[in-house]
């Protein structure tokens, strides 16, 4: 197989959540490209620069063509995204040790990629890959609570994207930056160290970024299920954060005027249910994404029931039972599909835990309305 075949197969396996097989394919490709086995464990900038020039076998400061170097840069960009997805699984399972290990791999990958991009003579490839890898790295820094660095990386990504001839007019590329920025705002809004008013301002900023992302995704001719589902997942996260804070961007004014008594009627609950249903329809063959949506919906309902037990219970029974059936159907389809590689057991364990939690929140079938 050629490098290009490996590249597309690894991306395909990542989309199917076959993370082990995708990681093995990337590692084999890096080995064939001449990377050392311990390259992921290095974080020192000087050592990485020395490794890069030694690997390329050229004098320091010399520009290179976009052949082998360009392939390595593209592999590194997608490899960083894969490591972020694996770290996300460990984060959901509350496994801090393995999560930190994957974050360290991401940082090494980013350092190698940026060092290699300095040597490219293909400006278009450099701008395009810089925009992609800095966008994802900004999201990683946000998860590490390094807010200002994260926003700076996203600003750099936007600058490189505007210089790219092929990608500057690509709405999905801009949508990805807005989605990452919304994710940063939501992560910071949930931080316990933030004041309630500051969290509300961050929540409004997240809503604005999500609207921009939606506008960009709408211009795409073919719907990208991955990014659209992530958009609805972030909208659900915003609803959970809003319910936890006890505020919503429209509700704050209405409560002050004394005209708002039911937050569900004012949009918070409607937006949550719409995001859940639309997200599940888009990802009907992806149990993991559906499980993320169902888990967030259960978090939202937990905060709702504290404020309005009766209304919360009815809504919970009606929509959660439907969402659980949809998730069970997606799991059944995924298990029936004949693939060469099975889906990652870490993903499967998480999906099963969400199904168990949903079953525990629902009353027996004969007691449901």
Image (spheres, rainbow, N blue to C red):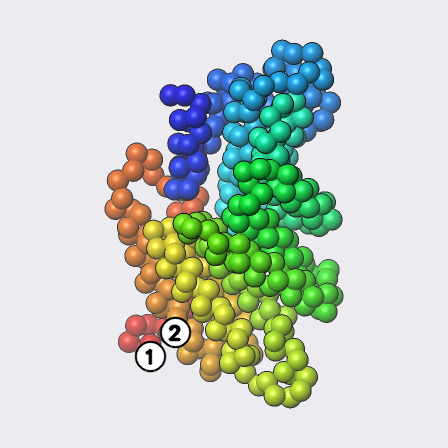
x and y percent of residue 223 in the render? 42, 52
Is residue 187 in view from this perspective?
no
Q: Position of residue 327 (x, y in %)?
A: 35, 58
- Residue 162 located left or right of residue 296: right
Q: Is residue 351 left or right of residue 41?
A: left
Question: Which of 214/242 is in front?
Answer: 214
Residue at image position (73%, 65%) is 198
Seen from the viewer's position, the closer of residues 310 and 151 is 151
Q: What element does badge 1 sit on?
A: loop
Q: Residue at x 60, y 63 (%)?
A: 207
Residue farthest along the bottom direction in this orientation: 258
Labels 2 and 1 touching (C-beta < 8 A): yes
> Please, is residue 183 above or below residue 123 in the view?
below
Helix, strand or loop status at disc 2: helix
Residue 212 seen in this snapshot: yes
- Nearer-the-camera pick, 205 or 217: 217
Residue at the (57%, 53%) spot, across then down: 179
Give the mark nearest the N terminus, 2 or 1: 2
Relative to 359, does residue 86 appear above or below in the rendering? above
Q: Residue at x 60, y 37 (%)?
A: 164
The C terminus - image quarter: bottom left
Question: Mark 2 and mark 1: span between their CA atoms?
Answer: 7 Å
The residue that disc 1 covers is 369
Q: Which mark is residue 317?
A: 2
- Judge the density around disc 2: few (<14), some (14-19), many (≥20) Cα neighbours within 10 Å: some
């Amino acid at each position: 197989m050629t490098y290009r075949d490996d590249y597309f197969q690894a991306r395909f396996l990542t989309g199917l959540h076959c993370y082990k097989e995708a990681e093995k394919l990337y590692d084999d490709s890096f080995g064939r490209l001449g990377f050392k086995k311990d390259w992921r464990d290095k974080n020192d900038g000087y050592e990485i620069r020395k490794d890069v020039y030694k690997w390329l076998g050229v004098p320091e400061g010399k520009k290179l063509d976009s052949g082998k170097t360009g392939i390595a840069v593209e592999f590194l960009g997608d490899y960083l995204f894969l490591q972020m997805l694996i770290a996300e699984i460990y984060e959901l399972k509350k496994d801090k040790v393995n999560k930190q290990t994957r974050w360290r791999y991401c940082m090494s990958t980013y350092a190698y990629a940026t060092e290699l991009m300095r040597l490219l003579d293909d400006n278009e490839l450099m701008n395009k890959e810089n925009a992609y890898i800095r966008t994802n790295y900004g999201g990683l820094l946000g998860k590490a609570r390094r807010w200002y660095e994260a926003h700076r990386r996203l600003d750099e990504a936007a600058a490189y994207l505007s210089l790219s001839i092929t990608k500057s007019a690509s709405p999905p590329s801009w949508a990805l930056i807005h989605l990452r920025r919304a994710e940063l705002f939501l992560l910071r809004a949930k931080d316990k160290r933030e004041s309630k008013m500051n969290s509300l301002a961050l929540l409004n900023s997240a809503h604005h970024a999500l609207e921009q992302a939606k506008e960009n995704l709408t211009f795409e001719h073919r719907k990208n299920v991955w990014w659209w589902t992530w958009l609805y997942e972030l909208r659900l996260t915003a609803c959970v954060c809003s319910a936890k804070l006890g505020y919503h961007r429209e509700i704050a004014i209405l409560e002050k005027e004394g005209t708002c008594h039911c937050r569900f009627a004012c949009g918070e609950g409607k937006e949550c249910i719409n995001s859940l249903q639309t997200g599940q329809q888009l990802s009907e063959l992806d149990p993991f994404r559906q499980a993320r949506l169902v888990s967030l919906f259960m978090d939202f309902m937990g905060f709702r029931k504290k404020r309005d037990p009766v209304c919360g219970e009815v809504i919970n029974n009606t929509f959660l039972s439907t969402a659980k059936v949809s998730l069970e159907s997606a799991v059944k389809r995924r298990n029936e599909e004949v693939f060469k590689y099975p889906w990652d057991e870490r993903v499967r364990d998480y999906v099963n835990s969400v199904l168990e939690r949903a079953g525990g929140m629902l009353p027996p079938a004969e007691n449901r309305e």
